[in-house]
Image: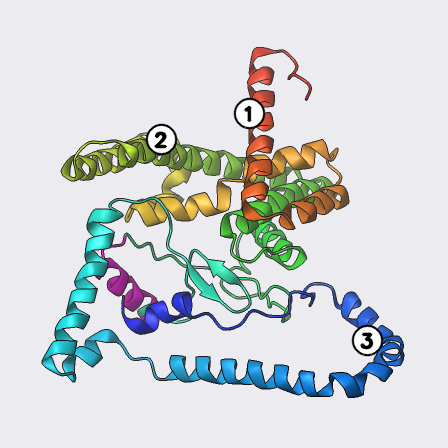
């Protein structure tokens, strides 16, 4: 990866004011109405605080200006190597080798997705491009650094309430149930978004899309739509089961003490077994052919991408169940989770997943789950 492609992760711009609400303009209006009261209260302190305030502004300005200067003067490492003296060129080349070594040897065959950090969204496990050629260019740079990379089309994305998200030609002609899923999913991001926790955000939005679609179908009372949604759910469940079992197998392989070569062979065997299982399932269910493109390039990155959208879905389903399927109560509980530090948030989600698994097992064996 060149210097320009890593600079966002290493040198993010200052984060936005955490007190600002992106999805609730009513809060902003309320704050504006409070200005006269605030001004009246602090008027007597303005003179005394003026010097300190200017010093604070000056401090932030020099920090912002310095950061911008650093970013604007950054250059791709290969370009610098080509015009540097021999000693610097050798050192930069060695750094690139160190990066490749860290990927191939020290972090060999990791299932942990790479992160990039941005001012508003925080750190996320993907990059978005409007031009496919640029996406493939980044793919080649990442692959050269030793990473598995997955490139796929995105029909829509959320601006988290900063703009009115348009209805795009990329999905407008999809089946109605899929359009509904997409809209519910993206709107969920406007309702709640936690910086630097992609799995939380996408799994929450997936759970909301599921609950939203169920309610949409109940409202529509159209048997054909219900049948369409049930078929899609069945196909999606088969796909996710294949991915889930393969990821579990790969985690076992990567955590084992076998040699690196054996890990590579184990990875290849696991992916081949997944593809064979998919072909077998597809023979009995031709509708699965919609996943052919995904199975054309299965690797760690492709598997991790699915996990981002699904890993925490069972926990959110259980949370909705415990909220008696009441969405406002569910959202309040999710907001409370979002305010926790990430380790505590993950622990709560783990507990929810455990309760969901226990309830599912009890249902299969025909007995009630144990009360907490």
Q: How many marks?
A: 3
Toward the left, the furthest residue is 86
Q: Secondary structure at mark 3?
A: helix
Of pointers 2 and 1, the one earlier in the residue sequence: 2
Label disc, if present, on residue 357 of the rendered structure:
1
Q: Residue at x 67, y 56 (%)?
A: 191
Image height check: is 182 above or below 273? Answer: below
* Highlighted magenta segment, given as a residue range: 134-147
Q: Nearer the viewer, residue 15 or 371?
A: 15
In this image, 140 relative to 224: left or right? left
What whole-number distance in Å separates the C-alpha atoms at marks 3 and 2?
A: 58 Å
From where the camera sits, is residue 274 visible? no
Q: Which residue is mark 2?
A: 281
Identify residue for label 3.
32
Locate residue 276 relative to residue 127 in the image: left or right: left
- Frontmost residue, 128 versus 73: 73
Q: Position of residue 95 (x, y in %)?
A: 20, 66
Label 2 residue SS = helix
- The picture places residue 3, in percent across and down from the top left corner, at 30, 72
Q: Nearest to the eye among marks 3 and 2: give it.
A: 3
In reply to whether residue 137 is colored magenta, the answer given is yes
Dominant secondary structure, magenta:
helix
Who comes first in sequence, dot 1 or dot 3? Answer: 3
Rendering quarter of residue 100: bottom left
- Near-viewer residue (132 or 107): 107
**Mark 3 or mark 2: whose residue is earlier in sequence:** 3
Which residue is rendered at x = 43% and y = 65% of the image? 128
């Amino acid at each position: 990866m060149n210097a320009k492609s890593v600079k966002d992760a290493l040198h993010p711009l200052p984060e936005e004011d955490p007190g600002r609400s992106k999805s609730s303009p009513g809060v902003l209006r309320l704050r504006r109405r409070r200005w006269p009261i605030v001004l009246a209260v602090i008027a007597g302190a303005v003179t005394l605080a003026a010097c300190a305030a200017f010093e604070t502004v000056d401090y932030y300005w020099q920090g912002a200006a310095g950061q911008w200067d650093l970013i604007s003067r950054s250059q791709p490492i290969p370009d610098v190597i080509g015009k540097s003296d021999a000693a610097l060129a050798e050192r930069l080349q060695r750094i690139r080798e160190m990066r490749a070594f860290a990927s191939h040897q020290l972090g060999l065959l990791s299932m942990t997705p790479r992160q990039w950090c941005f001012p508003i969204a925080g750190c996320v496990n993907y990059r978005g491009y409007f031009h496919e050629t640029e996406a493939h260019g980044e793919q080649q740079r990442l692959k050269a650094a030793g990473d598995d990379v997955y490139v796929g089309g995105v029909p829509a994305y959320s601006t988290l309430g900063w703009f009115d998200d348009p209805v795009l030609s990329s999905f407008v002609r999809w089946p109605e149930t899929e359009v509904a899923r997409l809209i519910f999913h993206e709107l969920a991001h406007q309702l709640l978004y936690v910086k630097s926790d992609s799995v939380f955000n996408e799994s929450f939005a997936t759970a909301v899309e599921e609950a939203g679609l169920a309610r949409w179908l109940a409202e529509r009372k159209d048997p054909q739509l219900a049948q369409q949604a049930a078929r899609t759910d069945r196909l999606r469940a088969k796909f996710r089961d294949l991915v889930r079992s393969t990821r579990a197998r790969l985690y076992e392989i990567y955590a084992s003490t076998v040699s690196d070569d054996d890990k590579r062979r184990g990875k290849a065997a696991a992916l081949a077994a997944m593809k064979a299982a998919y072909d077998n399932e597809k023979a009995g269910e031709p509708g699965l052919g919609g996943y052919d493109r995904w199975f054309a390039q299965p690797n760690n990155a492709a598997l991790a991408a699915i996990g981002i959208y699904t890993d925490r879905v069972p926990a959110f389903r259980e949370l909705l169940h415990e909220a008696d399927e009441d969405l406002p109560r569910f959202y309040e509980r999710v907001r409370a989770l979002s305010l926790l530090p990430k380790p505590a948030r993950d622990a709560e989600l783990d507990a929810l997943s455990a309760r969901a698994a226990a309830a599912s097992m009890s249902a299969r064996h025909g007995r009630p789950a144990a009360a907490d």
